[in-house]
């Protein structure tokens, strides 16, 4: 006798998740479909739950190579909850598989507006950029559909939620570290990295630190050997009050160049903001051994010492 199916939306979704983890994608899709029908029969609307079910079913379609239905379900999910990360990434992957590269590029770029550190989106943008340059020529950007502007409210919602999207970013950061540290860049990639870093520098001068992070992150995909790229990205994180990210980038910069004064200074600033005053003073001390007359470092040292009193 076949096991009895759950009779609740939550139970069906959980069963679908289990089937998906077991590689039973068709079975998982059927369970998500049952959950959707049950949910849609209710009197009250639950758009977030419905969006998740569409997105989960889209993942099944993507695994089975059914890209058309994946796109359809992702679009339904996004109609219910706009700018959700997973449907955007899954739809981008489906568009890419179908060689609908302009639409894939738009979805990957939209994800980067929500969080500029999602590595799968950064890598997707790089792949699409190369393909589109080859197929559409140097003015390829003018031939793309409009990229939607993600409202600040959607970005704040993501930033304040410790949910699946944060796990996506954590996996992406780990992937960046593992992928780039083991790779020796070619001369061509070093040049691409340099150009992207300079574009990031120009954005910093204009005060667009979020976009600058995106450029520095793209640069690091091509070459991770430039200490200044990490310390420049750390500056952006500082301005955006992303202090833990600033510490990570400064640490990466110092692993490449142990005398990077800016990295020591910015990490000291980040530690101060995190109220880790001892670590801040340690970095200032290291900086002053390199540049004993560094005025900003002496001033920061005084400020940190006052906080310790």
Image (tube, grey):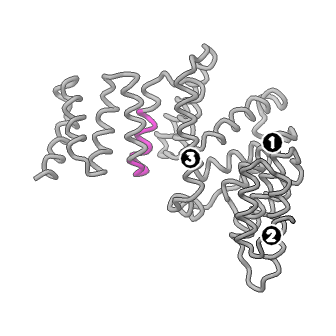
Q: Residues within 10 Å of mark 2 (few under 14, many from 20)?
A: few
Badge 3: how crowded within 10 Å, few (<14), some, or many (20+)? some
- Between the C-alphas of marks 3 and 2, the distance is 34 Å
Reading the image, the residue beneath label 1 is 102
In terms of depth relative to the viewer, which is nearer, 259 or 119? 119
Residue 238 magenta-drawn? yes
Asked if the magenta segment contains residue 125, the reply would be no
Q: Is residue 67 shown above or below 43?
A: above
Residue for badge 2: 5
Looking at the rendered structure, the number of numbered marks drawn on it comes to 3
Q: Is residue 242 above or below residue 52?
A: above
Nearer mark to the viewer, of 3 and 2:
2
- Where in the figure is residue 28, as x and y percent of width and height? 80, 57
**Left or right placement of residue 270 versus residue 207 in this view:** left
Which disc, if any, is residue 10?
Answer: none
Q: CA distance from mark 1 to mark 2?
A: 41 Å
Left/right of residue 52 with respect to residue 25 in the rendered view: left
> Mark 3 or mark 1, which is nearer to you?
3
Q: Which residues are magenta?
A: 231-243
Q: Position of residue 149 (x, y in %)?
A: 66, 56
Q: Residues within 10 Å of mark 1 (few under 14, many from 20)?
A: many
Quadrant assignment for the N terminus? bottom right
Query: Label 3's element?
Result: helix
At a point 46% along the width and 37% down the height, the residue shown is 233
Which residue is denoted by mark 3 in the rendering?
A: 169
Q: Earlier in the sequence, mark 3 or mark 2?
A: 2
Lower sequence index among marks 1 and 2 = 2
Residues at circles 3 and 1 in contact by the CB criterion of under 8 Å: no
Residues under labels 3 and 1: Cα distance? 24 Å
* Residue located at (80% from left, 59% from top): 75
């Amino acid at each position: 006798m076949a096991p009895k199916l759950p009779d609740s939306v939550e139970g069906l979704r959980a069963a679908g998740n289990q089937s998906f983890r077991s590689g039973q994608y068709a079975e998982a899709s059927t369970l998500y479909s049952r959950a959707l029908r049950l949910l849609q029969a209710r009197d009250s609307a639950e758009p977030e739950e419905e969006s998740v079910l569409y997105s989960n079913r889209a993942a099944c379609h993507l695994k089975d190579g059914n890209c058309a239905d994946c796109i359809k379900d992702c679009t339904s999910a996004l109609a219910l909850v706009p700018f959700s990360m997973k449907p955007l990434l899954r739809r981008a992957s489906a568009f890419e598989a179908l060689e609908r590269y302009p639409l894939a590029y738009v979805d990957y770029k939209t994800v980067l507006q929500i969080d500029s550190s999602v590595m799968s989106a950064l890598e997707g943008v790089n792949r699409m950029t190369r393909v589109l340059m080859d197929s559409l020529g140097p003015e390829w950007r003018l031939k793309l559909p409009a990229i939607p502007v993600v409202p600040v409210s959607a970005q704040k919602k993501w930033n304040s939620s410790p949910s699946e999207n944060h796990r996506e970013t954590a996996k992406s950061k780990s992937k960046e570290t593992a992928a780039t540290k083991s790779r020796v860049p070619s001369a061509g990639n070093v040049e691409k990295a340099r150009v992207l870093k300079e574009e990031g520098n120009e954005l910093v001068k204009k005060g667009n630190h979020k976009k600058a992070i995106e450029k520095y992150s793209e640069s690091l995909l091509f070459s991770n050997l430039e200490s200044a790229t990490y310390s420049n990205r750390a500056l952006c994180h500082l301005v955006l009050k992303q202090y833990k990210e600033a510490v990570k980038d400064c640490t990466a910069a110092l692993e490449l160049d142990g005398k990077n004064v800016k990295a020591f200074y910015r990490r000291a600033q980040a530690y101060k903001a995190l109220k880790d005053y001892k670590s801040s003073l340690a970095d200032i001390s290291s900086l002053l051994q390199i540049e004993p007359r560094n005025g900003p470092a002496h001033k920061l040292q005084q400020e940190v010492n006052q906080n310790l009193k």
